[in-house]
Image (cartoon, rainbow, N blue to C red):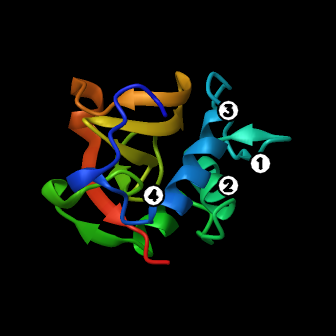
Amino acid sequence: MPTGMVVGGGNVSPLGEQAFNVIISEAQKYIGWPYVWGGAQPSTGFDCSGFTQWTFAQAGIKLPRTAQEQYDVSSKISPAEARPGDFVFYTGTYETDNYITHIGIYMGNGKMFDSNGSGIGTHNIKTPYWQSHLVGFGRVIH
């Protein structure tokens, strides 16, 4: 598990342990890979929503392609309800007509697993940059 990951007790994933472990095991294969705009599979690399779409598909969870579409199909939850395996959504991280511009897999303890400009890995969502763009959290129903 990535550093800072807590599973068990109140932090158990709403996806279920098996699905969560499949997703994170797949995600860990790409730690350190660069962000690739439009990338949605290992042969091309990954952007943020391509990364979530690919990793969740390995657990049999189908997601639409873009961060905006993944936001649209997620149930919105409060920060207090967020558990590992939920999504964290951002706006304004680049110029577009879409409201949602970035997505990460929430890992608990203020961390997300995502593909962003610094590459694929776990990143602190409590930095001033991420806090200034935070929209909220979502949960995929599968």
Q: Residues within 10 Å of mark 2 (few under 14, many from 20)?
A: many
Label 4: which residue? 97
Residue, disc 3: 30
- In primary-sequence order, the first of circles 1 and 2 is 1
Residue at x-position 25% and y-position 25% = 127
| Nearest to N terminus: mark 2 or mark 4 | 2
Mark 4, Cα crowd under 10 Å, few <14 / some 14-19 / many 20+, is: few
Name above or below for residue 28 compared with residue 48: above
Q: Is residue 87 left or right of residue 64?
A: left
Disc 2 target residue = 54
The amino acid beneath tag 1 is Gln
Which percent across, then down, holds residue 33?
A: 68, 26
Marks 3 and 4 sit apart, C-alpha to C-alpha, by: 29 Å
| Secondary structure found at label 3 | loop
| Residue 59 shown left or right of residue 9 in the figure | right
- Whole-angstrom CA distance, mark 3 to mark 2, is 11 Å
Q: Nearer the viewer, mark 4 or mark 1?
A: 1
Crowd rating for badge 1 (residues with CA inside 10 Å; few <14, some 14–19, many 20+): some
* Three-letter residue code for mark 2: Trp
Please tell me which residue lies in front, 139 or 129: 139
